[in-house]
Structure formats: C-alpha cells, structure tokens
Amino acid sequence: TQMRKLLRERLAAGLAAELNNLDPLARDLVLDALDVAFWLDSWMNMRAQLRLSPIHASRTWRFPAEAIVLQALTVPARPVAVA
C-alpha cells in the first residue's frame, strides 16, 4: 500500500505540469490509468514473462504513459458515471 501510494505521488509530481491543466476528475482518471499501467506487477511481467531487457521494458512503459497523457490533454473531459 505504501509503495503504491509513493508511486502515485511520484507520477503526480513528475507530470504536474500536464496534470495541472486538467480538471480534478480528469486528473484523477489519468493518475488511475498511469497507476495501473506502471504498478510493479507490470514491470515484473515485462522482465520475467516477456523477458524484455530493462531498456526495452522502459520504452514499453513510456509508450502507454505518453498515450495516456496525450489522450487526457487532447480530449475534453466528460462526466463519468460512477457506479
């Protein structure tokens, strides 16, 4: 739990310039998406199961990060129904 919280805080700090341009709901959605994409399990899967090198795994991580942020910055936020 602490590690996940730290990762989320680092993601928020590292992308503060981009995230600050979003409304709070969109910002939370982007952080949730990044949190899911970058949790330690995904790294372990890329290294152990997919057998990617550290450089290839890092590039693989960067692709969804850029896609998530670009999507958030180019598509107007729409209200999301909470179930």
Image: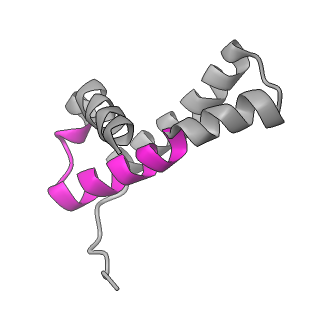
Magenta residues, as a range?
Answer: 19-38
**Which of these two is toward me, 83 or 2?**
2
Give the residue at x 42% y 45%: 35
Q: How is the image coloured?
A: one colour
Q: Quadrant of residue 16?
A: top left
Relative placement, left or right, of 50 versus 71 is right
> As displayed, is residue 44 above or below residue 76?
above
Give how far across and how far down residue 75 sits, in percent.
Answer: 37, 56
**Which of these two is toward me, 39 or 12?**
39
Relative placement, left or right, of 39 versus 35 is right
Q: Quadrant of residue 59?
A: top right
**What's the magenta bit mostly, secondary-structure-wise?**
helix
Give how far across and how far down residue 32 sits, in percent.
Answer: 38, 53
Give how far across and how far down residue 40 sits, in percent.
Answer: 54, 36
**Which of these two is toward me, 25 or 11?**
11
> If the image is split into quadrants, where does the N terminus sit?
top left
> As displayed, is residue 28 above or below residue 8?
below
Relative placement, left or right, of 74 versus 51 is left
Q: Is residue 24 magenta?
A: yes
Q: Is residue 34 magenta?
A: yes
Give the residue at x 29% y 70%: 78
> As displayed, is residue 19 above or below residue 14?
below
Give the residue at x 30% y 33%: 6
Seen as rendered, the residue at the extreme bottom is: 83
**Which of these two is toward me, 35 or 77?**
35
Give the residue at x 81% y 36%: 49
> If the image is split into quadrants, where does the C terminus sit?
bottom left
